[in-house]
Image: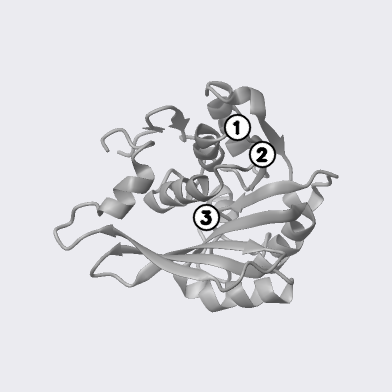
Amino acid sequence: MRNSYFQFKKFKIDQADCAMKVTTDASLFGAWVAHHASKSTSVIDIGGGTGLLSLMLAQKNEATIDIVEIEKVCFNQMQKNIDVSAWSKRIHCINMDIRNFVTSNKYDIVISNPPFHQQQLKSEDKAINLARHGNELTLEVLFKQVSPLLSDKGIFYLLMPAYRDFETISIAENCNMMLNKKTIVKQSVFHDPFRIMYAFSMSNHGDAVVDEIIIKDNKDQYTEKFIDYLRDYYLYF
């Protein structure tokens, strides 16, 4: 039976009431963003879920963070995870549909691990559908919501399944957002890419940097690159 919580070195994620649990790819994404966004001062996390990404980011810098989460039961659990953390005073949880979120604030960092799948087989559980499927919050809508939230030099960090790579970049271009960095993620040396981590901005930073992270090597051991990203978070690294 899967644990109802996930213990990191400096915080704990209770997740029993959240449809989407802590995953390896989400943890890697949080560590990747935190690594590249260490000097940010203001952050918004769209679709905060358990609060994982915001807590990983808060551990690495002094940014003030807003988390927007639509699903009420998940929001309540997320709020509890934030409240018992060391960074509760600078993380603000908002129970709202991002499409209704209005603010004059501009953010250095927008981060999102959104519902991945569109027009695919759904669960009978409405909460799982809301967390996994992007029929309510489509990728086009997400990009249009992000644009006015970014500061002049702000970065939008996004995690998506690899099969939506061309679509993601096309939508970004249509919304006048430019690709700064793309990191392809493979489960092992024997697997095709399954996730892609993106960094977009409203201004041109030159040619996009494209690289790769492989989670496990040919001996089914975590690679050094993966360990380097998660070393400050995972208990046994």
Residue position marked by numbered label 1 in the rendering: 62
User: Where does residue 179 sit, x and y in percent of width and height?
Assistant: 60, 69
Residue kind at label 2, given as amino acid type: Thr
Query: Quick one: label 2, few (<14), some, or many (20+) residues within 10 Å?
Result: some
Give how far apart the Cα atoms at labels 2 and 3 are: 40 Å
Quadrant location of residue 214? bottom left
Residue kind at label 3, given as amino acid type: Glu
Give how far apart the Cα atoms at labels 3 and 1 are: 40 Å
Quick one: label 3 or label 1, which is nearer the N terminus? Answer: 1
Give how far apart the Cα atoms at labels 2 and 1 are: 7 Å
Residue kind at label 1, given as amino acid type: Glu
Whether residue 95 is visible to the viewer of this picture, yes or no, is yes
Check residue 124 in the rendering and tell me which mark sits there, or answer none.
Answer: 3
Circle nearer the viewer, 2 or 3: 2
Tell whether 55 sits left or right of 229.
Answer: right
Query: Quick one: label 3, few (<14), some, or many (20+) residues within 10 Å?
Result: few
Quick one: label 2 or label 1, which is nearer the N terminus? Answer: 2
Query: Quick one: label 1, few (<14), some, or many (20+) residues within 10 Å?
Result: some
Tell whether 127 sits left or right of 225.
Answer: right
Q: Residue at x 24, y 51 (%)?
A: 222
User: Where does residue 173 sit, x and y in percent of width and height?
Assistant: 68, 75
Residue position marked by numbered label 2 in the rendering: 41
Q: Residue at x 56, y 43 (%)?
A: 49
Q: Is residue 205 above or below residue 2?
A: below
Residues at circles 3 and 1 in contact by the CB criterion of under 8 Å: no
User: Where does residue 101 sit, x and y in percent of width and height?
Assistant: 79, 47
Q: Secondary structure at mark 3?
A: loop
39 vs 183, nearest the viewer? 39
Q: Secondary structure at mark 1?
A: loop
Residues at circles 2 and 1 in contact by the CB criterion of under 8 Å: yes
User: Where does residue 153 sit, x and y in percent of width and height?
Assistant: 71, 55
